[in-house]
Image (cartoon, helix red, strand yellow):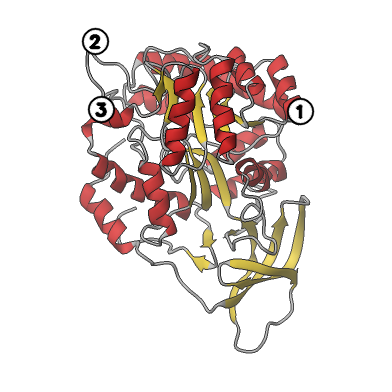
Amino acid sequence: MKPVPILHIVLLVVLSTGPLVAFADVLYVHAGRLLDVERGRVLENQRIQVDGQRIVAVEPWSAPPVGSEVIDWSDKTVLPGLIDMHTHIADLEQTNNVAEPLLHSPQAVALVGAHNAYRTLRAGFTSVHDLGTFRAFTDVALRDAINAGQVLGPRINAVGAFITVAGGGGEVTGFAPGFQVPEDMRVGVYRDAVDAKLKTRYLFQNGVDSIKIMATGAVLTLGTEPGQLEMTEEEIRAVVEEAKLHGSYVTAHAHGAEGSKVAIRGGVRSIEHASLLDDEGIRLAKEQGTYLVMDIYHGDYIDEIGRKENWPADYLRKNLETTEAQRVAFRKAVKAGVKLAFGTDAGVHPHGGQARQFAYMVRYGMTPMQAIQSATSVAAELMGWERDVGAIAPGRYADMIAVDGDPLADISLLEKRPVVMKGGMLVPQQLATRD
């Protein structure tokens, strides 16, 4: 993957200050077909009334008052804005160089994050759970800049940094013994359960929305194994209890079967990856109401691009050991009725291409409606944002996308750039950049 020129990114940030296409305070959207994801049905010829940033009414189409602002999507299918529950927007994309995170200043990484944010929003993802940056709190700063209207991007639920053991799945590794990684890349590294609790508290004091722990090793971290347990149940529970004190929750990176089950028993709200999850783990997730976020697309991307770009052999080996196993577990979880939310690990693969995963989810057991619900109503419930996003309904933000054709008949239509609205304003089709 080629780095994005910094001048290009600076231009994007400058031009992305307030460029959303604004309308009158009250506007009407004419939806030819509307996906009601809460009830799993399609509504024909609907009128969506928007007042400011939020939807105030959804009803059968009738002509609005004379002189009203109307967006004509009568020939399109209208869906809620999509939600990706596993991104790394505020960071560099994956390369073949294990030292890549050290080659860019915090300032440069922040600008790359702004670029990634626009690509994600333009692809129809109006909200994301951004699950960790190597430079701590870059995601918090990006979230705040987006919320202030300084940068174009999705609504972000930020975790700030990884809670991880030293040398574990959330560390920057692969260097000579004694090499000192910068402190802002080790903010969440802890020693024991008490320290894990204190590090969690520190993250909340610095503005994070939720917490991500690394319960097992990782595919794309040298010196760790996906099936290797890296946190005890006591340590996980300490983090979970601290998060609850802040009115929040914990999501766990866990590939291994045992690590996933320990994290579920420890009280996490979701398991990310769950690549090697066994039948007992699926049953436990179902019983506990734990969400699974299984990124079943990017294993193919890693294998293809990783071989082409000579990623470390260790990465490619671990990817092969987890990709098909994860898809088997995904199919079983769908059949068992486990709550599955859409998440892609964007940043490993390029931002803006997340919708490619929908076809994989259908191929491995979901209906098209279930796949879309996983990226709308289910994802919103997982984040605790169901009052604001995840459906086209009164009271929610006017976050929606419009596509040509019927995504329930051809889910790959979501891979094409849709028309995107966020908070009642249209997202520009392109900025003055080469993206």
On the image, the x and y values in percent for residue 405 come to 64, 57
Residue, x 50% and y 68% (percent of image)?
Answer: 425
Q: Which of 360 and 284 is in front in this view?
A: 284
Q: Which of 82 and 57 is in front in this view?
A: 57
On the image, the x and y values in percent for residue 435 come to 34, 53
**Residue neighbourhood size for the residue with mark 1, other residues' Cα within 10 Å, grouped as few (<14), some (14–19), many (≥20):** few
Query: What is the number of callouts on the image?
Result: 3
Report helix, strand or loop for mark 1. Answer: helix
* Nearest to N terminus: mark 2 or mark 1: 2
The residue beneath circle 2 is 177
Q: Which of 18 and 431 is in front in this view?
A: 18
Residue, x 58% and y 36% (percent of image)?
Answer: 245
Q: Do the residues labelled 3 and 1 touch (CB within 8 Å)?
A: no
Eye-nearest disc, 3 or 2: 3
Report helix, strand or loop for mark 2. Answer: loop
The residue beneath circle 3 is 182
Which image quadrant for residue 237?
top right
Q: Do the residues labelled 3 and 2 touch (CB within 8 Å)?
A: no
Cα–Cα gap, marks 3 and 1: 45 Å
Q: Nearer the viewer, residue 381 or 420?
A: 381
* Nearest to N terminus: mark 3 or mark 1: 3
On the image, the x and y values in percent for residue 424 come to 55, 67
**Residue neighbourhood size for the residue with mark 3, other residues' Cα within 10 Å, grouped as few (<14), some (14–19), many (≥20):** few
Instruction: Give left or right: position of 44 versus 316.
Output: right
Eye-nearest disc, 2 or 1: 2
Instruction: Give left or right: position of 404 versus 21.
Output: right
On the image, the x and y values in percent for residue 185 come to 32, 29
The residue beneath circle 1 is 335
**Amino acid type for the residue under numbered disc 1:** Lys
377 w.r.t. 222: above or below: below
**Amino acid type for the residue under numbered disc 3:** Pro
**Amino acid type for the residue under numbered disc 2:** Pro
